[in-house]
Amino acid sequence: MDFDLTKAQEMIRKEVRRFAQAQIAPVAAQLDETETFSAQLTRKMGKIGLFGMFVPEGFGGQDTDYLSYIIAVEELARVDGSQAATVAAGNSIGLGPIYQFGTEAQKQKYLPRLCSGEALWGFGLTEPEAGSDAGGTRTTAALDGDHWVLNGSKIFITNAACELSLGVTVQAVTGVRDNGKPEYSCFLVETGTPGFKAVPMHGKMMWRASNTALLYFDNVRIPEENMLGDRGDGFHQMLQTLDSGRLSLAAMGLGGAQGAFELALKYARTRNQFGQPIGKFQAVSFKLADCAMEIECGRNLLYKACWLKDQHRPFSKEAAMAKVYCSEMMGRVANHAVQIHGGYGLMKEYGVERFYRDQKLLDIGEGSSEIQRLVIARDLGL
Ligand SMILES: Cc1cc2nc3c(=O)[nH]c(=O)nc-3n(C[C@H](O)[C@H](O)[C@H](O)COP(=O)(O)OP(=O)(O)OC[C@H]3O[C@@H](n4cnc5c(N)ncnc54)[C@H](O)[C@@H]3O)c2cc1C
């Protein structure tokens, strides 16, 4: 076994950490407070190559392994959940399905812009009546000549209603299978197509500087060539995309936990009560010891899942384990980190409460903790 990262992976961690400290840390609190998605910051993240890292250079990507990309997301989340969300959603579930299932023409058309950070693509699965139950999709697509006509709506779609939004992958019902079950297919729907409306959602507790959208499709005509892959493959494409997406949500949990832990460690060393740093009290130092131990467990679990993916081996169960563990682990770490800060931990100025808030989405998005446990239990044959 070799637990060392490669030189290239170490370099990526160093560069992204430096970027996050210099460019994101100074503005993160303000963007969160004002609920502002920053196109400028997204472009900067594009310039240093954070979009399309695992995509071949021929399509504008960096051609790295998946673990390198996961390390980048981890480092962003160490500083700010919102920017990590923009990158994670822009890659794994945004441009990811186009890269994985798209035709050569679709890849040539969309990937170079998406890899540059000048444009973002959304992943349109969730609907008001179809959340955890991805098979509950009600959006329909009917063939009319050489066009598909889409009707329906999607909710909570990341990166789909900002000035950089180029389009969204939409799962729709395209018919009925021989076994009587719905047939799902996916479509690439470009922003600005008549009948397609994307409305930003506001009032989020977390990821407040990330763009979230409600989407409406009212007789939206999509050319046949904008179907993603083959007719009837939609559900499989979405589930496969979510397997990879879970690795990046796990990376957000891991990085967020690391960021909250570092703040707590620093505070425990400098805050004095009863004549000594609070870190000298065993009740505090044991909390930090638990955090360090859990972060180490999470990192090993997540990197192993990425390694499996990079080896082209099955990784669904490991991705589900990493996602649920790292998400919930960040919850425990952020809770300890706020506790160690005492009353100051509840003040925005100290920055630790943002980790506490940003964590909650990780228990819910891209398959809630309950759904991850279902995936793991199924693998156990239950
Ligand atoms: C900020 C944000 C960004 C998002 N980005 C995207 C995106 O880009 N694209 C996209 O498609 N979606 C996105 N989502 C949607 C997200 O994936 C869903 O919210 C999530 O899948 C849960 O669906 P739901 O909210 O409808 O909850 P529900 O499915 O209604 O679940 C409610 C509760 O019931 C539990 N539950 C449901 N079914 C079961 C079961 N079988 N067994 C046990 N418990 C169960 C759930 O775990 C949960 O606790 C985003 C959501 C948010 C908040």
Image: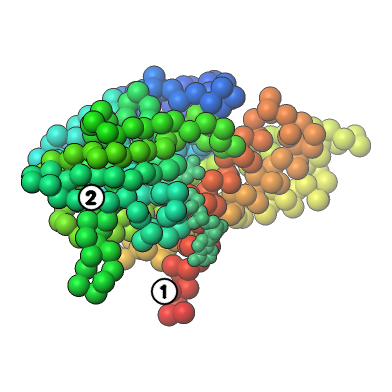
- Compared across the picture, whether 286 is left or right of 157 comes to right
Across and down, in percent, residue 189 comes to 24, 39
- Compared across the picture, whether 146 is left or right of 39 comes to left
**Residue 89 in view:** no
* In front of the other: 147 or 93: 147
Inspect the image, locate mark 1, and give the three-letter code of the amino acid beneath it: Asp
Q: Residues within 10 Å of mark 2 (few under 14, many from 20)?
A: many
The kind of secondary structure element at disc 2 is strand
Q: Which mark is residue 141?
A: 2
- Quarter of the image with the N terminus in it: bottom left
- Compared across the picture, whether 286 is left or right of 320 comes to right
* In front of the other: 314 or 40: 40
Question: Which quadrant of the view contains residue 110?
Answer: top left
Query: Who's the residue at 17% across and 46% down the image?
Result: 148
Task: Return the residue at label 1.
Answer: 379
**61 lies above or below 375:** above
